[in-house]
Amino acid sequence: MESLFTANVLAPLRLTTPPTTSFSLLASFVLLATLVITLTSRFSKERGNIPDTTYGWPVVGSLLAYSKDPVSYLRKAAAQYGKVFRTNMIFTSVVWLRDPSYNRFYLEVKEGLFLNKIVSPGYFDHLKTFVASLSRGINRKVALDHYTDVARTTTRDFLHGWAEQEVIDLFEHISELVHAIIVQCLMGPDFFSINGAELYDLLHGTEADIGNVLNFILPDWVPHPAALRLRRRRDRIREIFQERLEEREAHPDQWENAQDYISYTLKDSATAHLNHLYAAHHTLLMFAAHTSTVASISWTILELLKDSKHMDFIRQELSHNEEMQSSHYLQACLKETGRLYSGISMLRLARQAISLPNTNVTVPQGSVISISPYLTHRDPAIYPNADQWTPERWLKEPGLPKRLNSNGQLAYMPFGAGVHRCPGEKLAGIIASTVVGTVAQEYDITWGEGKADLTNLDFSKIGSPWLKGVSSVTISRKEV
């Protein structure tokens, strides 16, 4: 689970034309924006001493190159311009930091916040209060035990249904399962039974529109189609929360011993009076918890399919100890997936000018700053056989995460690091361990309609990449 509160993870920009916008209109917009930037850039007072990448068309060439293939673009730019460079995004620009020491520095930057279009006004004024509440509420032992029970029961229910189907699309079905677990754990069984399906549709619609290029390059006040759809979904989620909270207020005895996170926040003196902002809080939680947890589970299962010896090792361990979070090999598999299939970028907004340590580089105030966990995790100078899925690396050196993140470096960061470490890491671990472990223990899984190409990554979602296209598999109950 990558934390949107501490990392502001955004997807590569989508350049697909919005449904209500013709190509000619979008082309006209790009041309107009190019003219505006070309003229205004002459009068820019502060660009800092950071090189601008130039590829293809003037002004928009780097944006187009990044959107087409972010991995190739970032690698090429780092090779040509060094560890610090800037990408022009028309009405804004992104300063990229490409070094493990800069990853640590990035986390210490006092940041502004994105995603304003999907949360209620005023939420970010109470962000620290909500993050503190989240860390306290979801990491209590009684809560974690409850989440484990919910994950186990829900996983078995879903797997039973999947086994009755000829083939399933792994990422999409895991997405539905993870959503069901998250809603029950964080919001409660009432939200899931009454609004679970609608919340799932709202989440996916929001995921599709938040990555639209216009959301990133235009100011928040511009009412383009994607922004308007985001606001409508935001308002509907707020209505759902108002309905469910009113029901709970009318029947408080039914929720006296409930362990979902909303029940905790309603009793927490720090957050009880902020219930009008719960919808915004949980919208961000759904983003933070959903996409990357789905990726962790799905990529791990696909890697286990590639080489059955890994699945055999997990099954052997679980035959002696059914506690999935105690399975060393299963946890090594999940760690390796978190390394190999991490997000392409993390973004922050610098609220003041900042100087990079041990350099003469100054990042101007108002700049968007980005690092790339994906490229750090696949750096052969840091990880031997960096592009190979090798769980054994974490077993051979149990202290590897600590070593990678010592001496001012930050080279392993699936959940952030330090005070900015994701507070939902334990919950994400419970969900991933339970799903993968239950599949290993109780089911056989085979390729459905041919083997998938695991190099075909889709970075368009917020958080970790998914697989482009359909990942069809067949799941069947193991014969006793």
Image (cartoon, helix red, strand yellow):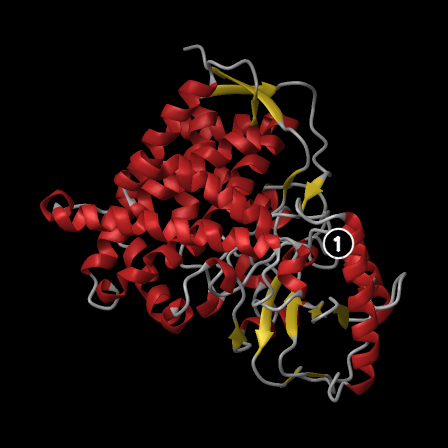
Question: Left or right: 274 with respect to 18?
Answer: left
Q: Position of residue 254 (x, y in %)?
A: 13, 42
Q: Position of residue 229 (x, y in %)?
A: 53, 51
Viewer-nearest residue: 336 or 434 = 434
Check the image and report above or below for 223 versus 389: below
Question: Left or right: 1 with respect to 451?
Answer: left
Q: Position of residue 388 (x, y in %)?
A: 70, 42
Viewer-nearest residue: 326 or 125 = 125
| Residue at 57% in and 67% down | 220
Viewer-nearest residue: 239 or 266 = 239
Toward which corner of the image does residue 138 lie, by quadrant?
Answer: bottom left
Check the image and report above or below for 452 versus 251: above
Secondary structure found at label 1 = helix
| Residue at 36% in and 53% down | 238
Viewer-nearest residue: 122 or 437 = 122
| Residue at 33% in and 69% down | 129
Toward which corner of the image does residue 93 lie, by quadrant?
Answer: bottom right
Q: Residue furthest top?
A: 479
Whether residue 264 is visible here, answered yes or no, is yes
Q: Residue furthest left?
A: 253
Give the number of marks: 1
Q: Amino acid at mark 1?
A: Ser
Toward which corner of the image does residue 364 lie, by quadrant?
Answer: bottom right
Question: Left or right: 232 with respect to 168?
Answer: left
Q: Position of residue 201 (x, y in %)?
A: 47, 39
| Residue at 42% in and 28% down | 438
Q: Residues within 10 Å of mark 1 (few under 14, many from 20)?
A: some
Whether residue 326 is visible here, answered yes or no, is no
Q: Quadrant of the C terminus?
A: top left
> Which residue in the structure is indicated by mark 1?
67
